[in-house]
Image: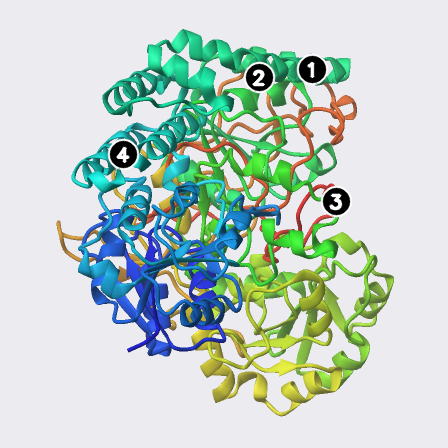
Amino acid sequence: MPRFSIVIAAYRVQGYLRACLDSVLTQSFRDVEVVAVDDCSPDFCGAIIDEYAARDGRVIAVHQPVNSGPGRARNAGAEQATGDYLLFLDGDDTLAPGTLQGLADRLAVNDDPDILYFDHVRTYWNGRRERSLYGDLLASAGTDVFSVLDRPQFLRLFAMSSNRVYRRDFYTGHGFAFSEGIYEDALLSYRTMLTARRIAATDLVGLEYRQRRSGASTRSPGAAHFVIFDQYTRLFTFLDGRPELTPLRPLLFERAVSHFLFCLDNPARVATPDRPRWFRRAAQWYDAHLPPGFTPPPEKAERFEALRRGSFARYRAHELPRHWVRGARRLRRTVRRPVATRAKRALYRVHLGQPVDENLAVYSAYWNRGVLCNPAAIYHKARELAPQVRGVWVVRKSEVAALPEGVEYVIPGTRAYYRTVARARYLINNVNFANDVVKRPGTVHLQTLHGTPLKCMGLDQQRYPAAGAGMSFTNLLKRVDRWDYALSSNQHSSEVWERVYPSSYQLLETGYPRNDVFFTATPGDIARIRAELGIDPDRTAILYTPTLRDYERGFTPRLDLERVARALGERMVLLVRAHYSYGQDPGLQRLQEEGLVIDVSRHRSVEELCLAADALVTDYSSIMFDYANLDRPIVIHADDWEIYRATRGVYFDLLSGRPGDTPGPVARTEDELIAIFREGRWQDAESTRLRAAFRERFCQFDDGHAAERVVRLLMPCQDAAPAAAPEAPGAVVPPVPDAPPGAPETAPAGGVITLTSAPAPAEPGGKAEGDAGAPVSPAGTPPPDGPMAEGSAKGIAEETPGDAASPSGPPAEAPPAGPAPVDGSPPDVAAPDVSPAEGPAAEGATGEPDAAPASPASPVTAPEVSPPAAEVAPGPAADASGEQPRDIPPAPPVDAGRS
C-alpha cells in the first residue's frame, strides 16, 4: 500500500498536464501512486495520461465515459486509490520539489492525523509567485494536533481541495465525496474540517497553484456560478444536524457571505448584467441563514449592511470611489496620446461603426511582408471554394513591387487600411495584426502560426532574456486575446500553444495549409523547380538552413561552406538559405559565383526549396518538421547545442537519439557532418527509422487538405461538401504513398515523391477511396479553370467591390501598368509604412495575438473533405522556423517574438 495516492483530475489542461505529472513522479519520496482521471477531455489529456501510465507503473489511468465535472472526476479517482493518504491535485497545478517527503515526515511526527494542511504559492503567467496569506496561521499550530472547535480560526484557511492530505480511512469512512458543480471544493473543505477530530498543519509551501489567464471554470462568468448558493446551503444543512458546532455558525456565515461578495465584485465570475440577480440571491441567502447576534467584521460592515437591507443601490454607492479612480486614470492616458494618434484612432472608430462586410477577408504574413506561408495557402483555397469572399492583403510599401499579379492590397497606416481592417469579417495572419486592431463582434480572427516549436515560445520566453529581449508580454497577451482560432499541426504544438499563448481561442487541429503542396506536387513540378534553381538532374541537392541565434548580434557562419561543398564532391550540391534577418552575406555570394553552392536565401518559397532538395541539413530551425512530410533524409548539425538550449530554451532534446526526438543523424562538428554524407549514414536504415518516428510524432495532421479544412470551417463555401478531418487526436496520419505504378515521371535522385491522397466522393456513412491529386500549377500560371494564383498586384480603390476571379470564371481583368496604391495615387506617392510609434502598434511575433470569444481553448474537429478541384499553388511561402520567416528582410520590430 503506497503512502500517498495523488488523484489528478484533468480536463482541457493538455498544456499543463505533463508538468503536473512530472512534479509528482519526480519527487524524492517515491512511495506514491498517481490516479490520473481523464474527464472525457476533448484534447490530448487522455493520450498524455496513457503515455505516462505505459512508462511508469505508479500511474493508474482512469477515463470517464462522459465529461462530469471536477467533483465527479475526483470521486472516480478516489475510488481507485489505495494509499494511506489522499491528495487531490488539479491537472494544471504542480507540487514543489520535496513536498511529499516533507508531508511524510510531518505525518510521522503527528502520528497520522485525519487531515494535514500545508501552504501554497500562487504562480502567474509573468513568472510572479505570490505566497499565500495563511503561512503564519499554519505555522501557529506547531506540532499540535487539534480539532476546529479548539482552533476555529483555521476555518479561515483557503477552502480548496489541494492544500491538504486526507487520511483515506477517515475520508472514505465518513462517506465524503465532492458535490456537483463548481465551488464543490469549498463545501467538502468545510465539511471535512468540521468532522475531523485530529488536525495538523505545517507551513511547508508544497502546492504551486497556477493562476491561468483563461480556461479555469471560475474565470468564465455565467449561470454556473450561481450554484455557490446551493453549496453553502448544503453546508448549513450539515450544521443543522450537529448542534455541537453551533458556536462556529457565525464564522462560517461570514465566510460564506464574504465568498458571495468576492464573486460579485469579480467580473470573471459574475458578468455585469448578472450582478443585480446575484445580489438578490445573496440577500435572500443572508436573510435565511443569519445567525442570532451576528456582527459583521468592521472592514466589511457597509457591504454586509447593504446585503442585509437588500439594497443593491446602496452596495453600488460603496463602489463609486473605485470607479472614479479608474475613470481618471483612463482620462489621463487619453490626454497623453499624440494628436496624430488620436486622429487615426478617430478615423478607425468611424469605420468600426459601419457594418461588417461578411464577404471581406484581410490577410497578412510575417509583419506585412507579402503573400506567404499559411495565410497564402488559405487565401488561394478560399478563392477556389469561397470566391464570394474578397481577399485583401496588408503589405508594407517596400514589398508591393514583389506582390503576385492580381492581389489586392492595402498599405498599413493609410485610409484604405483602416477602412478595410475595420470592416472585414475575417482577419487571418501568421504573426499578429497591429496592437490597436479591434476585435469586433461577429468577426473571426485566425492565427495560423508558422512552425512547430522546438525552441521556447510565447510566455516561456520570459525565462530566457536573450530570447525575450524587447518583447512586451503584456502586449503579447492582448494580441492573443483577439484570436478566435489558432492552427496546430500536431499534438506537441497543441500542448505548447495552449500554455504559452493562454486565452479562450479554439485550437483547430487541421495541419498547416502551407504544407499541402508536399502532398500535391508531381514529379514534373519538382523537376521544374530544380531546373529553375539550376540543379543538374544527376546531382543530389542538400538544403542547408541554419536558424537565428538570439545570443549573437550578427551572422556567424556555423560551417566552412567552401570546405563542406568541396568535401561532398561533384555529385552533391549545397542549397544554402541563410536566415533572412542577417541580410546579404558577401562570402555566400562569392561561393555561388564560384559554383560551389547555390544561394537560395532570397527565394520566395521555402516549400519549393524543400521539394527541390533530396536531403535537409539544419540545426534548430522548425523547417525540419515541415520537411519531414516529404520523408526525405534530415541531418542535424548542432555545434552549439548547449549554448542554444541555455539561452533560448527548448521543449525536447533534439540530440537525444530517441525515436520521435531526433529526425536523423546528428553531427556536432563539421568533420562529423562531412563523414555522415561520405559514409552514407544520411540515408541508411537507422536514418530511416529515426525519420519515421519523427514523422509519426510531428506530421500528425498534415495530409494535403489543411487549407481546405480551414476554409470550410471558417467561410461559407459554394459547394456544401464538408472537409475531411485529419486522424483523430492521438492517431497518426498514414505515411505518404510512393508514386503509383505507371506514374509518368520519376523522382530526382535521392528524393521521395509524394502524391495527393484525395478521397473520392463517399457513400453516406462510408469511407472515400483515394485518387491522385491535381498537380500544382507552375509558378505564376493559373491552374486550368481555377482562380488566378498569381496575377499582377493592384491596390484597392476607395470603395471598389472585390474583383478576384471566380474559380470557374475568366481571369481578373488586366490591371494598369504597375501597382495602384490604395487611394489611386501614383506608386511613388503611396502612403509610407507606419512605424510602431504611429498607427496600430507594432505587430508581435508568432504567437502575439488578438481578441477572444468566450469559447474555451479546445481542438475543433473538422468535417469531411470533398474531392478537391485543381489544386491552386500556394502563394510564396515563408520560414518554417517557428516564428520568423526564412526569406525577406528587414527584421521584425523589437517588440516581436522570434522563433
Q: Secondary structure at mark 2?
A: helix
Q: Is residue 476 left or right of residue 781?
A: right
Circle 3 or circle 2, nearest the eye = 2
Q: Earlier in the sequence, mark 4 or mark 3?
A: 4
Circle 4 or circle 3, nearest the eye = 4
Mark 3, residues whose alpha carbon is within 10 Å: few (<14), some, or many (≥20)? few
Please tell me which residue lies in front, 505 or 146: 146
Q: CA distance from mark 1 to mark 2?
A: 19 Å
Please tell me which residue lies in front, 434 or 33: 33
Location of residue 761 with respect to 823 vertically, above or below: below
Circle 2 or circle 4, nearest the eye = 4
Q: Which residue is mark 2?
A: 322
Q: Is residue 440 left or right of residue 832?
A: left
| Res 232 label | 4
Q: Which residue is mark 3?
A: 470
Specify the amino acid type for callout 3.
Gly
Where residue 622 appears, as percent x and y from the top left, is: 58, 62
Q: Which residue is mark 1?
A: 334
Which quadrant of the figure contains the C terminus?
A: bottom right
Please tell me which residue lies in front, 467 or 691: 467
Q: CA distance from mark 3 to mark 1?
A: 25 Å
Q: Is residue 866 visible?
A: no
Circle 1 or circle 2, nearest the eye = 2
